[in-house]
Image: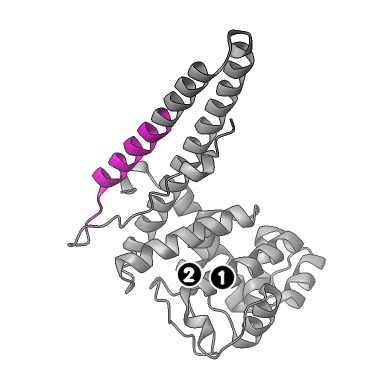
Amino acid sequence: MKFDLEYYRDDIITKMEDDNGNSNRTKMKFGYKCMRCSYIALFLFCSLFIVGTTKNNDISSQFNHVQFQMNEIETIIKKDIFKQESIKKILTIINNYESVMDSVLRCEVANVIFEMTIKYQNLDIDLICATITHESARTWNPVVKSPVGAIGLMQIMPSTGEMLVEMEGIEWYDTILNDPIINIKLGSMYLSTLIEMYEIDGGLAAYNGGPRRAERWIRYNKADNILPDETQKYIPFVLGYYKLFLNMDDSRIM
């Protein structure tokens, strides 16, 4: 009998702030314990079922099957713990900048940021959070708009947004970039593409100043007089946040 472990997988993303807006580590620790107990109980159930329904000469092969299932369970546990720790870190970063988002939306934003790091292997949560922090002028305001018309957490221009939604197969509407989930998905796709083409500093230059300028900057060995002043400052600002978030002490993570 083959047990579908994914069916039993419990997604324990929950509201991680209490009604006063304080971080709640207890809920997360309790969630981890419940998750581990659930997997252990499932393993015991599988073992007892196999022992009770197999003949003696099949026990060895069935035990190998149980061991394989146990390894799968262990992998799922590790992935879930990594996911929850990542989301906790993202929420801590958001809370540091006093975003106007309510706690439910913060959790949704944290979840989609983590999902983007799974989808795009050249991005991590620290780089996405660094980009959002600088792009939103440290506000994490989902509807922030720049003087030149860039919109949302990842400050996407409408013309760029129309191109990106077509690539993603999403229907365009006028306020779509104000949706923080879609904004992060589009911005992450764009940033990942640019980093793949130009590496991290060139990708950031292209994200802010456009691919043509970034290409010319790289072609001339990143000379100082090629990028606009804003883009020259943009790269070290984002990389500074990136380094800050990478080196966050565990005591600062709720």
Q: Which residue is mark 1?
A: 234
Mark closer to the observer (2, 1): 2
> Given the image, on which type of amino acid does mark 1 rest?
Tyr
The disc placed on residue 134 is: 2
Q: Is residue 160 left or right of residue 90?
A: right
Q: Quadrant of residue 158?
A: bottom right
Rounded to the nearest angstrom, the CA distance separating label 2 from label 1 is 8 Å
The answer, for residue 179, to whether it is visible in the render is yes
How far across and how far down the image is residue 120, in percent?
64, 57
- Residue 63 in the image: state x and y as whole percent: 57, 16
What residue span does the magenta drawing correspond to? 22-40
Count the numbered circles shown: 2
Q: Quadrant of the N terminus?
A: top right
On the image, the x and y values in percent for residue 206 come to 68, 72
Secondary structure at numbered mark 1 = helix
Q: Residues within 10 Å of mark 2 (few under 14, many from 20)?
A: many
